[in-house]
Image: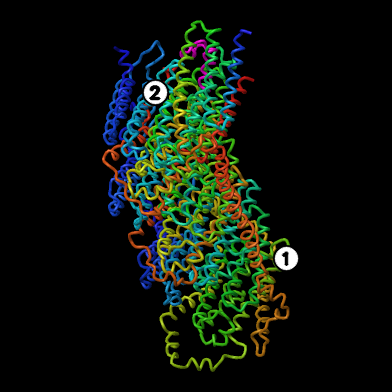
Amino acid sequence: MTDFMLFLPELFFILGALLFFIFSLRKSPNPAGFHRWAVVLSAVGLLITVASSHQEGMLFFNCYRVDLFSQIFKVLLALGTVWVMFSSSELKGIDSRQHAEYYFLIFVCTLAMMMLVSSVELLTIYVSMELSSYSLYLLVPMRRGEDRYFESGVKYFMIGVTSSGFMIFGISLLFGVGHTTYVPQLIKALPAVIHQPAAIVGLVLTLAGFFFKLALFPFHIWAPDVYQGASNQVTTYIATVSKMAAAAMIIRFAGLSGGASPGLVKLLIVLSIASMTFGNLVALIQKDLKRLLAYSSIAHAGYILIGILTLNSQGFASAIYYAAAYLVMNYSVFMVIMKVADDGHNLQIKELAGLYKRSPLLAMTFMLGLFGLAGIPPTAGFTGKFLVFAAAVHKGYLFLAIIGMVNATISLYYYLIVFKAAYLLKPVKEYPAIAVDMWTRVMSIVLVVMTIYLGLFPDQVVSLTEAAARTLF
Amino acid sequence: MNSLSTYLIISALLFSLGLLGILQRRNLIGMLISVELLLNAANLNFMAYNRFLVSDPVTGQVITLFVMGLAAAEAAIGLSIILALYRKMHSINIEAAQKMKG
Amino acid sequence: MGALFRDPVLLATVLGTNIPFFSMAVILIFTRSNPRLSSRISVGSIVVSAVSAISLLVKLFSAPALQYQTLWFCSGKLNIAFGYYLDPLSLLMLTIVGIVACLVQIYSLGYMAGDPGYSRYYAFQSLFAWAMMNMVIAGSMLQLFIFWEMVGLASYFLIGFYYEKWSASQAGKKAFVMNRVGDVGFFLGLILLLIGFGNLGIPELNHAAVTHGLPKGLVTLSALLIFCGVIGKSAQFPLLTWLPDAMEGPTPVSALLHSATMVAAGVYMFSRIFPFFSASPEAMQVALAIGTVTMLLSSTMAMVTYDLKQVWAYSTVSQLGYMVMALSAGGYFAGVFHLTTHAGFKALLFLCSGIFIHEFHTNDMRIIGKKGGRRLKIPMVCMTIGALALSGVPPFSGFFSKEAILTVLAAQPSKIWYAAGLFGAVLTAYYSFRLIFHILFPKDGIEEQHHHAEHGPDAHEHEEEHHGFAFRAMAIPVMFLAGVSVVLGFTEHGLEHFLMRLVPRAGEVSAHARSAAAVHGAVNATAAAAAHAQEPSGSLLMVLGISAGLLGITLAWFEYGRKGASRKGFLSHFPAVWKLFDLRWFLDILYRKGLDTFVYAGLTSLFVKNDRRIIDGGIDGICVFTEGSGRVFSFLQSGMLQFNLVLMVLVAGAAVLYFVI
Amino acid sequence: MTAMNMAGFPILTTILMTTIIGLLVIIFIPPEKTKLIKQVSLVSASLGLALCLWLYHAYDFHKGGLQFVERVLWVKSLGIYWFNGVDGINLPMMLLTSVVLFTGVWTMWELEHRVKEFYALIFLLVAGVYGVFMSMDLFWIFVWYDVSLFPMYPLIAIWGGTRKEYGAMKLTLYLLAGSAFILPAILFLWAKGGGHTFDLFMLQKIGFSVFDQKVAFLMLYLGFGILAAVWPFHTWSPVGHVAAPTAVSMIHAGVLMKLGAYGVLRIGMTLCPQGAVYWSHLMALLGTIGIIYGALAGLAQTDLKYVIGYSSVSHMGIVGLGLATLSVNGINGAVFQMFAHGIMTALFFSAVGFIYDRTHTKVIPELGGLSKTMPIASSFFIFAALAGIGVPLMASFWAEFLVLTAAVKVFPVAGILATSGMILSALFMLRVVQRTFYGEKNPKWEHIPDVSMFLTVPRVVLMSCILFFGLFPKVMLDVIQSTVIPFVTRF
């Protein structure tokens, strides 16, 4: 019975998925109804997740661990899902006949990721990883019309399967050197044998799979096309929710080497620097807002990695915090995008012109989101960066902090350009004022408050993340 | 000739072949097949390790079965996407899909 | 605060010196729109100051030097005091300033009547009076420097009073900046003393200098630096060119600032810390040389110009040169005495020429002569008196002071200084009477017809103007000053006694007396030498002095005075020399060129370019480079899937290799 | 968060709150009620001013040290404290901030374009400034520092003048690039200090190794130096000021530039005395170059605001030189100069701002003879120019006097060069005054009204500040040196 309680959130999302599966069998689609269902279900899901956030225990022959770490990420996943569901009210990007499937796949994907963050056994990890990927493979090409965007689906798929191939091969090597598939035992076993090439190569290849999900350089190559190609809601989902899971898994696996391999750390440092720099530099020249955010997400992956590569609880905690902050800020940006481009087209930067007139509230949310991403206080983004760099410097990587800050300055340039579009530019043609319903108002205010609150009063959250990080060791 | 390393080398070869195929084939189907090679290389690893090193003989085989299953699913999804692409672009050549860049 | 009212002296001092400031504030803030009221306020306040100054002089005539001081602020070990130091010298100077300022302001009532900037004029006059008086009674060198700067500021405003005229504002700027050049030296000297000695109190400084409480090098260096201040303020060589330009200001201003008070400030400061200076013979020698050069140069310049005010300006410079010579030759009293007399007759001369200018609306002595300048009896007579005093003809005041100076110079080991002094005296007499004769006996008589023309409708108002308020306002001060220049000379011994009287008290160990002792210590050394050199040839010197003056006058007479004189001046035979003198020995051109080439064309443009091109260019370049590299990197993200996969695999492979090997 | 020795009423937090609450109130006022917005902002600004004046008066400089301390544990795991307090160094800065804010808000009374956002951003900015000055915790100092920087972008880019978007972008990126050095330096010190406190004074007790001090101080000096317009990082200052609207220039040149110098003093010299000693020659060199360079480059400018921008460079050079001497007088002078220059520049910009609003040009040749048409406005500018020249009995004279005294003592050559800079500053200030206000009356500005009584008030406040502290420097120096004297014992 208690096991059942431990598994409750996942079970709930399974039920939700099933429900939408049934809906998808119906002849007459009813988008509004589906949306209402989706919001309610996901909201309940969130509540359940939160309620069960302090449970601990093992399931399925110790393949499945429920602890603070996993539960925090589950909460984040559920939260992201709720938000995406919330913003799916006008799902113009997707044919209304496919709405049910869309919700179904989203639920499945969230479920898979929830399982991912709690599973501590290689096969389980692989399976749930694949499950989430498959649903995303299907979600991305769902975009209606837009033939020129279709190729992004193919690219996403090909790159995805390749990197999953890497991953399973890496897992096989780990299995070979560790003689077990249980992560806790691996953590004990690996540091001893980490100097064997097989072990470290296996670890790297395994991580590659997660890097792919996190869109870390050089596994980022799908990100720009997918962000641009997928419908706004799906992009939002990929940009926010699936990042959480990836971050969680990298944190779990980076710990495997137990810090016994300086080489691995070097590799991670190189990757994080490359990722930050590449993402920011290429973002400078983007015109399409979603594509720009794709590159910025690549850069942010680099920042998260800085926290992780310290391989100590403080660093992991900061990474978790950063992930959470990133979820909030990124969503507040995307929400505004979805509102502004309510017919589901791809928003160009210049289309934001005069946003401050069309809807001051959205403009403010947007601004705070951007400044958060740029890491300007007093937003959550700043505090996240601060914690990450603090961890790095504390470990002795001063140069990482400097490079990170320089990158932050570069990134500020393009965030300011977007900000300028929203606040300064006179619109070329007169756009209508944006209809903002009550829920959106509430949502924007919630987001603004969260951004500021996390930025100024990080105390509880930080201590929570540290408690979570400690469970990994 | 029946040592672990033999199998490992073979799987490594498989893996490299698969990789080569992915990078070199322009035909999407071909790429998909090469991906299967990657997975099979992994499978071979699992079996080999399982046979030579690991105490509990089940694990590897179970994993292999799982991977096969997933591979099948993957193929299904992949083929469906390729089909859709063919419908839109009348080609299953990856070169047809390189408009998005920069 | 209580002390202020308990002590009448202090009260008089504070009130007398600061009331002009309040009048300025009141005028600027409230009564700008009401000229009459403004002038009344200003004149009233200056009268108060003058009266209080005189009463102080009388009250303290035989009292010991008084010193009031209180802590202004302290920073670390640095204690800056604010205080007054009332000794004979400062009292004398205070009186001079008070009286001259008072007279000039009264004079201005007439001269400036109807000027649009009437109120502004009086505001700045008050500002000047305030600054000058405070400078005079300052208790410490720093305080002196501060008000010294304020004096400079006031003169900046007064010179540039007609700011619509480009040349006027230019002159103001020039004066201020050139003064600044000197002041930087002054300031550095003070800082040096502050670091080396730690106290800038005037009595303390003098005492330390006399009792050799200061290291020799420090004294010399700081004395030289401080002397830069004198050079700037008293328009000594090489910074003398601002003063003639300063004549752009209204004539009363020239009379006040650039004859009697402001430019005298330099000399005053010199004599203020005279013992300190005299502790370093080297510095004194430099000063002596500079004074001499200045004196000769400027008198040569005065010989060629036809502009009334210019002549007096140059002569002012040369007279200041005299004073500096006197002081640096050790003639403390001689210098101060000449300062006093000069203040009298130079103010007189300027005010007289002011009347002419006001009357004939021109500065050119020839035209004034033509138009019948000599008809204006009062100014003509007074000006002649002034000129006589200037050229050192007995019994006018100038004679006595110049004699004193020459005596001191004669006491110098090398006689060259004395010769220079005499030669200067000749030149002085020459150029001043050149001017007088120009007006008295114009080239071909007075243009009668012109005068007849004046006998027309406007003749009445002409008459009336002679006896109108304006004329009276101008005439009274002039006559007063003329009287002063006649009698002042005879007070020599009284003044000497007054200035030196504290000497017998030197024995007492009172803080105030000490400085007097210092003065004495320094003075009687030289004075003794002077006396020793003087005894055999005292009368000879006097004869020489007088004859020098008369020689100059006769020379002028032969050239400009007598019937059928050429009225050319012997210099006109040497056009090159004439040009040289006329262009102020090319000093101005030199400065202009230097400023243009080194500062404007050189450093400034270089720096501006550097900012635009290198620094800013560099920054912008970095930005451009960053964006460009963004473009380059974006090629990594090619549309071709497999290219991207290759990239991915390569990196992964590289990582793997890195670990395997 | 557990309260620790919360000393009585949190006056400092209240001062901070006056701006933040003002900000919130403004956000909730509908944008069309401009009058109300202005009134609200003026009220909250004057509230801050009153509190700061009271604070200044209540500070006991005989006791000295840190007073009105508020200390609350904020983030346990990192050792971040909500830790505010005033001492002789930041008290004048607080006062300066409040004065400039007050006058700035008043000066912009005639603003009509997007009033609400303007005042909101101004208050955000000033909240940051107050925060930096009052806070004694490295984390908060940095947070407030950034908070005070980024509103500059919209403020310049929306309400600015010449090349506003270029100027805004340049200034913002430039200054935030500075913080790319500051944050790592702060974290470095924190980590070297054991990584359990950001409290300035707890860190001060930990003796950092000399090498660490050198590294950290250099980074801090570079980072903060950019904002203090240290040569050669000064070029943003003219460009930015030219672009910025009046009140923003006032606050930026008057207060924000001081943040840089303050940061060097507060963090760098407090935590890394050895580093400061090691780098002091560099500081002196750059400071002196700044003084001369700024004045000379200013000579050639034709835009009023450019001129002022360069004069700021020159004056901040004096601050730098003063800090470099590491002596009581030098630092006293530097802090005093920060205050004096702040007030002075504010006056400059408010005068220029008025002229610009009326004539719509800042180009000196186009102006000229202005003192005929607008005597009062001109007199403001001329007054400021005199203060800039360093005329005695104005606050900046004392500052320069102290700094130069110390400089001649410690770095004779630099000191003498800096002193001769007085000539240059006189030259170029008077040149500007002459070309702008003197000369023939310009018929173009014939019918321009002069400053109204109402708009005179803020300028008069500033002028009286300059005069007051010029006549009674004691009032300020006693406060400053109460902290500085113990401060310099550590060099």
Dot in front, 2 or 1: 2
On screen, residue B69 versus residue A100, left or right, reads right
The colour scheme used here is: rainbow
Q: Quadrant of residue A125?
A: top left
The residue at 45%/56% (across/down) is D161
On screen, residue B13 versus residue D376, left or right, reads right
The residue at 59%/13% (across/down) is B7
On screen, residue B95 versus residue C463, left or right, reads right
The image shows residue D110 at horizontal and vertical percentages of 35, 58
**Amino acid at the residue labelled 1:** Ile
Asked if residue C64 can be seen in this view, the reply is no
Q: Which mark is residue A112?
A: 2
The residue at 54%/82% (across/down) is C381
- Position of residue D361 relative to residue A55, above or below, is below
Mark 2 and 1 residues: CB-CB less than 8 Å, in contact? no
Classify 10 Å Cα crowding around label 2: few (below 14), some (14-19), many (20 and above). Answer: many
**Amino acid at the residue labelled 2:** Ala
**In the rendered image, which quarter contains the C terminus of chain D?**
top right
Q: Chain of mark 2?
A: A
Classify 10 Å Cα crowding around label 1: few (below 14), some (14-19), many (20 and above). Answer: few
Q: Judging from the image, what secondary structure is the residue with disc 1 in?
A: helix
In magenta segment, residue D26 = no
Q: Quadrant of residue C407?
A: bottom right
**In the rendered image, which quarter contains the N terminus of chain D?**
top left
- Position of residue C482 relative to residue C409, above or below, is below
Q: Judging from the image, what secondary structure is the residue with disc 2 in?
A: helix
Q: CA distance from mark 2 to mark 1?
A: 110 Å
Q: Chain of mark 1?
A: C
Q: Which mark is residue C416?
A: 1
Numbered range of the magenta stretch: A166-190
